[in-house]
Image (tube, rainbow, N blue to C red):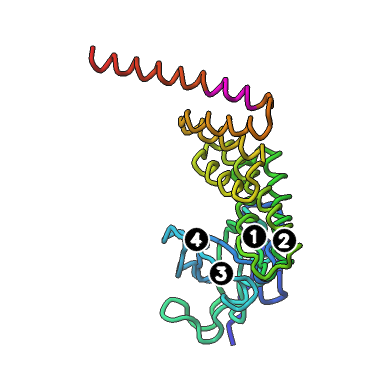
Amino acid sequence: MSDAVTIPEEYIPIVDGLLWKKILQEGSGDSPTKKSNVNVHYVGTLFTTGEKFDSSRDRSAPFNFKLGVGQVIKGWDEGVKTMKIGETAELVCHPDYGYGASGSPPKIPGNSYLKFEVELLGFQESADNPTAKLALANKKKEQGNTDFKAGENTKASLAYKEGADLLKDMSDATEEQQKESQQLRAALLSNLAAAYLKIKENAKAAEACQTALTIQPENVKVIYRLSQAYLGLSEFEEAKKIAQTGLEVAPGDATFTSLLSVINAKQAAFKKQQQAAYSKMFS
Protein backbone atom coordinates (compact mmCIF):
# COMPACT_ATOMS: atom_id res chain seq x y z
CA MET A 1 0.00 0.00 0.00
CA SER A 2 1.17 3.53 -0.78
CA ASP A 3 0.90 6.25 1.83
CA ALA A 4 -1.97 8.69 1.28
CA VAL A 5 -0.93 11.75 -0.69
CA THR A 6 -2.93 14.95 -0.87
CA ILE A 7 -3.39 16.21 -4.45
CA PRO A 8 -3.84 20.02 -4.68
CA GLU A 9 -7.25 21.23 -5.86
CA GLU A 10 -5.86 22.79 -9.06
CA TYR A 11 -5.31 19.27 -10.40
CA ILE A 12 -8.45 17.93 -12.09
CA PRO A 13 -9.25 14.20 -11.69
CA ILE A 14 -8.99 12.30 -14.98
CA VAL A 15 -9.42 8.85 -13.43
CA ASP A 16 -10.86 9.23 -9.94
CA GLY A 17 -8.24 8.61 -7.27
CA LEU A 18 -5.65 7.46 -9.80
CA LEU A 19 -4.81 10.24 -12.25
CA TRP A 20 -4.96 14.04 -12.12
CA LYS A 21 -4.16 16.79 -14.62
CA LYS A 22 -3.33 20.50 -14.58
CA ILE A 23 -3.08 22.38 -17.89
CA LEU A 24 -0.11 24.76 -18.06
CA GLN A 25 -0.49 25.79 -21.72
CA GLU A 26 -3.65 25.32 -23.77
CA GLY A 27 -3.39 23.46 -27.06
CA SER A 28 -5.68 23.34 -30.07
CA GLY A 29 -7.26 20.92 -32.52
CA ASP A 30 -8.04 17.27 -31.97
CA SER A 31 -6.82 14.89 -29.29
CA PRO A 32 -5.03 11.64 -30.18
CA THR A 33 -7.03 8.44 -30.32
CA LYS A 34 -6.09 4.87 -29.44
CA LYS A 35 -3.15 3.54 -31.45
CA SER A 36 -2.10 7.03 -32.54
CA ASN A 37 1.66 7.48 -32.79
CA VAL A 38 2.29 10.28 -30.28
CA ASN A 39 5.25 12.66 -30.08
CA VAL A 40 5.90 14.36 -26.70
CA HIS A 41 8.46 16.12 -24.56
CA TYR A 42 8.33 15.35 -20.86
CA VAL A 43 10.00 15.88 -17.49
CA GLY A 44 9.32 13.23 -14.83
CA THR A 45 9.65 13.94 -11.11
CA LEU A 46 8.70 12.24 -7.84
CA PHE A 47 5.54 14.04 -6.76
CA THR A 48 6.33 14.17 -3.05
CA THR A 49 9.97 15.32 -3.29
CA GLY A 50 10.18 17.01 -6.71
CA GLU A 51 13.28 14.93 -7.53
CA LYS A 52 13.71 14.55 -11.30
CA PHE A 53 14.19 11.00 -12.55
CA ASP A 54 13.89 11.38 -16.33
CA SER A 55 13.57 14.07 -19.02
CA SER A 56 13.34 13.98 -22.79
CA ARG A 57 14.26 17.68 -22.79
CA ASP A 58 17.62 16.90 -21.19
CA ARG A 59 18.29 14.55 -24.10
CA SER A 60 16.97 17.11 -26.65
CA ALA A 61 15.00 14.24 -28.15
CA PRO A 62 11.18 13.98 -28.11
CA PHE A 63 9.70 10.65 -27.04
CA ASN A 64 7.46 8.67 -29.40
CA PHE A 65 5.01 5.93 -28.46
CA LYS A 66 1.78 4.28 -29.60
CA LEU A 67 -1.12 5.41 -27.44
CA GLY A 68 -3.38 3.00 -25.58
CA VAL A 69 -1.57 -0.26 -26.28
CA GLY A 70 0.47 -0.58 -23.08
CA GLN A 71 3.80 0.74 -24.34
CA VAL A 72 3.85 3.25 -21.46
CA ILE A 73 2.41 3.49 -17.94
CA LYS A 74 -1.37 3.77 -17.54
CA GLY A 75 -1.07 7.38 -16.43
CA TRP A 76 0.35 8.31 -19.82
CA ASP A 77 -2.11 6.23 -21.85
CA GLU A 78 -5.06 7.82 -20.06
CA GLY A 79 -3.63 11.31 -19.62
CA VAL A 80 -2.12 12.02 -23.03
CA LYS A 81 -5.33 11.07 -24.82
CA THR A 82 -7.00 14.10 -23.15
CA MET A 83 -4.42 16.55 -24.56
CA LYS A 84 -4.41 18.68 -27.70
CA ILE A 85 -1.46 19.55 -29.94
CA GLY A 86 0.63 22.31 -28.37
CA GLU A 87 -0.78 21.64 -24.91
CA THR A 88 1.54 21.38 -21.93
CA ALA A 89 0.10 19.75 -18.83
CA GLU A 90 1.15 18.18 -15.57
CA LEU A 91 -0.04 14.62 -14.99
CA VAL A 92 0.04 13.24 -11.46
CA CYS A 93 -0.11 9.46 -11.32
CA HIS A 94 -1.09 7.20 -8.42
CA PRO A 95 1.38 4.29 -8.10
CA ASP A 96 -1.19 1.99 -9.74
CA TYR A 97 -1.01 4.27 -12.78
CA GLY A 98 2.77 4.53 -12.54
CA TYR A 99 5.28 1.84 -11.60
CA GLY A 100 3.29 0.19 -8.80
CA ALA A 101 4.69 -1.41 -5.68
CA SER A 102 7.98 -2.41 -7.32
CA GLY A 103 8.82 1.06 -8.69
CA SER A 104 11.61 1.42 -11.22
CA PRO A 105 14.90 1.22 -9.31
CA PRO A 106 17.14 2.94 -8.64
CA LYS A 107 15.43 6.29 -9.30
CA ILE A 108 11.76 5.49 -8.62
CA PRO A 109 10.97 3.81 -5.28
CA GLY A 110 8.02 1.47 -4.96
CA ASN A 111 4.58 2.99 -4.41
CA SER A 112 5.66 6.40 -5.71
CA TYR A 113 3.29 9.09 -6.87
CA LEU A 114 4.74 10.58 -10.05
CA LYS A 115 4.40 13.95 -11.75
CA PHE A 116 5.07 14.41 -15.45
CA GLU A 117 5.16 17.72 -17.26
CA VAL A 118 4.13 16.67 -20.77
CA GLU A 119 4.01 18.70 -23.98
CA LEU A 120 2.08 17.13 -26.86
CA LEU A 121 4.11 18.03 -29.94
CA GLY A 122 2.00 16.10 -32.43
CA PHE A 123 0.53 12.75 -33.34
CA GLN A 124 -0.23 10.52 -36.30
CA GLU A 125 -3.49 8.63 -36.11
CA SER A 126 -3.42 4.93 -36.86
CA ALA A 127 -4.44 3.83 -40.32
CA ASP A 128 -3.83 0.16 -41.04
CA ASN A 129 -6.09 -0.45 -44.06
CA PRO A 130 -6.88 1.39 -47.33
CA THR A 131 -10.25 2.71 -46.13
CA ALA A 132 -8.74 4.11 -42.93
CA LYS A 133 -5.81 5.61 -44.83
CA LEU A 134 -8.10 7.42 -47.25
CA ALA A 135 -10.28 8.75 -44.44
CA LEU A 136 -7.31 9.98 -42.45
CA ALA A 137 -5.58 11.48 -45.51
CA ASN A 138 -8.76 13.44 -46.30
CA LYS A 139 -8.84 14.63 -42.70
CA LYS A 140 -5.22 15.77 -42.97
CA LYS A 141 -6.05 17.65 -46.16
CA GLU A 142 -8.91 19.49 -44.43
CA GLN A 143 -6.67 20.24 -41.46
CA GLY A 144 -3.95 21.56 -43.75
CA ASN A 145 -6.43 23.72 -45.66
CA THR A 146 -7.66 25.29 -42.41
CA ASP A 147 -4.09 26.00 -41.27
CA PHE A 148 -3.10 27.36 -44.70
CA LYS A 149 -6.05 29.77 -44.78
CA ALA A 150 -5.10 30.96 -41.29
CA GLY A 151 -1.54 31.65 -42.43
CA GLU A 152 -0.16 28.76 -40.34
CA ASN A 153 1.94 27.51 -43.23
CA THR A 154 4.37 25.33 -41.27
CA LYS A 155 1.48 23.54 -39.55
CA ALA A 156 -0.25 23.20 -42.91
CA SER A 157 2.85 21.64 -44.47
CA LEU A 158 3.02 19.05 -41.68
CA ALA A 159 -0.63 18.07 -42.17
CA TYR A 160 -0.31 17.85 -45.96
CA LYS A 161 2.88 15.78 -45.71
CA GLU A 162 1.33 13.38 -43.20
CA GLY A 163 -1.64 12.92 -45.53
CA ALA A 164 0.52 12.34 -48.60
CA ASP A 165 2.77 9.90 -46.74
CA LEU A 166 -0.25 7.85 -45.65
CA LEU A 167 -1.02 7.09 -49.30
CA LYS A 168 2.45 5.95 -50.34
CA ASP A 169 1.56 2.27 -49.94
CA MET A 170 -1.93 1.33 -51.08
CA SER A 171 -1.02 -2.14 -52.32
CA ASP A 172 -4.04 -3.74 -50.64
CA ALA A 173 -6.51 -1.21 -52.08
CA THR A 174 -9.21 -1.92 -54.65
CA GLU A 175 -8.90 -0.41 -58.12
CA GLU A 176 -11.38 2.33 -57.16
CA GLN A 177 -9.47 3.09 -53.96
CA GLN A 178 -6.19 3.19 -55.90
CA LYS A 179 -7.66 5.79 -58.25
CA GLU A 180 -9.03 7.87 -55.36
CA SER A 181 -5.75 7.68 -53.48
CA GLN A 182 -3.72 8.85 -56.49
CA GLN A 183 -5.96 11.87 -57.00
CA LEU A 184 -5.90 12.71 -53.31
CA ARG A 185 -2.13 12.26 -53.02
CA ALA A 186 -1.53 14.55 -55.99
CA ALA A 187 -3.75 17.20 -54.38
CA LEU A 188 -1.96 16.85 -51.04
CA LEU A 189 1.45 17.17 -52.70
CA SER A 190 0.32 20.22 -54.66
CA ASN A 191 -0.93 21.85 -51.47
CA LEU A 192 2.26 20.81 -49.69
CA ALA A 193 4.28 22.60 -52.35
CA ALA A 194 2.16 25.74 -51.90
CA ALA A 195 2.78 25.68 -48.14
CA TYR A 196 6.52 25.13 -48.63
CA LEU A 197 6.67 28.07 -51.05
CA LYS A 198 5.10 30.29 -48.40
CA ILE A 199 7.85 29.43 -45.90
CA LYS A 200 10.65 29.64 -48.51
CA GLU A 201 11.36 25.89 -48.46
CA ASN A 202 11.86 25.95 -52.21
CA ALA A 203 13.83 22.72 -52.54
CA LYS A 204 11.15 20.82 -50.63
CA ALA A 205 8.46 22.50 -52.74
CA ALA A 206 10.22 21.34 -55.91
CA GLU A 207 10.46 17.79 -54.59
CA ALA A 208 6.75 17.72 -53.73
CA CYS A 209 5.87 19.00 -57.21
CA GLN A 210 8.09 16.48 -58.96
CA THR A 211 6.40 13.64 -57.06
CA ALA A 212 2.94 15.01 -57.86
CA LEU A 213 3.82 15.23 -61.54
CA THR A 214 4.62 11.50 -61.63
CA ILE A 215 0.92 11.04 -60.77
CA GLN A 216 -0.58 13.88 -62.84
CA PRO A 217 1.97 15.05 -65.45
CA GLU A 218 -0.29 17.79 -66.82
CA ASN A 219 -1.48 19.34 -63.57
CA VAL A 220 -1.03 23.05 -64.33
CA LYS A 221 -1.09 24.13 -60.67
CA VAL A 222 1.76 21.78 -59.88
CA ILE A 223 3.73 22.86 -62.98
CA TYR A 224 3.29 26.50 -61.97
CA ARG A 225 4.44 25.82 -58.41
CA LEU A 226 7.44 23.84 -59.63
CA SER A 227 8.50 26.80 -61.76
CA GLN A 228 8.06 29.08 -58.75
CA ALA A 229 10.20 26.74 -56.64
CA TYR A 230 13.05 26.83 -59.18
CA LEU A 231 12.74 30.60 -59.32
CA GLY A 232 13.07 30.71 -55.54
CA LEU A 233 16.22 28.60 -55.85
CA SER A 234 17.58 31.06 -58.48
CA GLU A 235 17.62 28.23 -61.03
CA PHE A 236 16.30 30.56 -63.70
CA GLU A 237 16.78 28.40 -66.78
CA GLU A 238 15.00 25.46 -65.16
CA ALA A 239 12.22 27.78 -63.98
CA LYS A 240 11.76 29.06 -67.55
CA LYS A 241 11.80 25.54 -68.95
CA ILE A 242 9.03 24.46 -66.56
CA ALA A 243 6.98 27.59 -67.29
CA GLN A 244 7.27 26.86 -71.01
CA THR A 245 6.00 23.35 -70.30
CA GLY A 246 3.04 24.96 -68.59
CA LEU A 247 2.30 26.95 -71.74
CA GLU A 248 2.42 23.77 -73.80
CA VAL A 249 -0.13 22.16 -71.48
CA ALA A 250 -2.25 25.32 -71.26
CA PRO A 251 -1.53 27.43 -74.38
CA GLY A 252 -1.95 31.15 -73.85
CA ASP A 253 -2.36 30.84 -70.08
CA ALA A 254 -1.67 34.33 -68.72
CA THR A 255 -0.31 33.02 -65.41
CA PHE A 256 2.58 31.33 -67.20
CA THR A 257 3.33 34.25 -69.52
CA SER A 258 3.35 36.55 -66.47
CA LEU A 259 5.59 34.13 -64.59
CA LEU A 260 8.04 34.02 -67.50
CA SER A 261 8.27 37.81 -67.39
CA VAL A 262 9.01 37.70 -63.67
CA ILE A 263 11.67 35.01 -64.18
CA ASN A 264 13.39 37.01 -66.95
CA ALA A 265 13.37 40.18 -64.84
CA LYS A 266 14.79 38.43 -61.77
CA GLN A 267 17.42 36.66 -63.86
CA ALA A 268 18.53 39.99 -65.36
CA ALA A 269 18.69 41.58 -61.91
CA PHE A 270 20.66 38.60 -60.60
CA LYS A 271 23.20 38.84 -63.42
CA LYS A 272 23.57 42.56 -62.85
CA GLN A 273 24.17 41.97 -59.16
CA GLN A 274 26.80 39.34 -59.93
CA GLN A 275 28.59 41.64 -62.40
CA ALA A 276 28.68 44.39 -59.81
CA ALA A 277 30.14 42.00 -57.25
CA TYR A 278 32.84 40.85 -59.70
CA SER A 279 33.72 44.45 -60.54
CA LYS A 280 34.28 45.20 -56.85
CA MET A 281 36.49 42.13 -56.48
CA PHE A 282 38.84 43.13 -59.29
CA SER A 283 38.74 46.92 -59.02
Does dot 1 land on a helix, a strand or a loop? loop
| Mark-to-mark CA distance, 3 and 4 | 10 Å
Residue that carries the numbered disc 4 in the rendered image? 62
**Residue 134 shows which numbered tag?**
2
The residue identified by callout 3 is 65
Counting residues from the N terminus, which is met first, the one under dot 4 or under dot 1? 4
> In the rendered image, which residue does mark 1 sit on?
167
- The percent position of residue 3, horizontal first and vertical second, equals 58, 82
Callout 3: SS: strand
Q: CA distance from mark 2 to mark 1?
A: 7 Å
Q: Amino acid at mark 1?
A: Leu
Cα distance in 3D space between marks 4 and 1: 25 Å
- Give whichever of 226, 47 is nearer the camera: 226
Other-residue count near label 2 (Cα within 10 Å), few / some / many at <14 / 14–19 / ≥20: many
Magenta-drawn stretch contains 271: no
Q: Earlier in the sequence, mark 2 or mark 1?
A: 2
Q: Report the residue at 61% width, 82% height from top.
A: 96
Other residues around mark 4 within 10 Å, as few (<14) / some (14–19) / many (≥20): some
Q: Earlier in the sequence, mark 1 or mark 3?
A: 3
Q: Horizontal and vertical percent for residue 109?
A: 47, 81
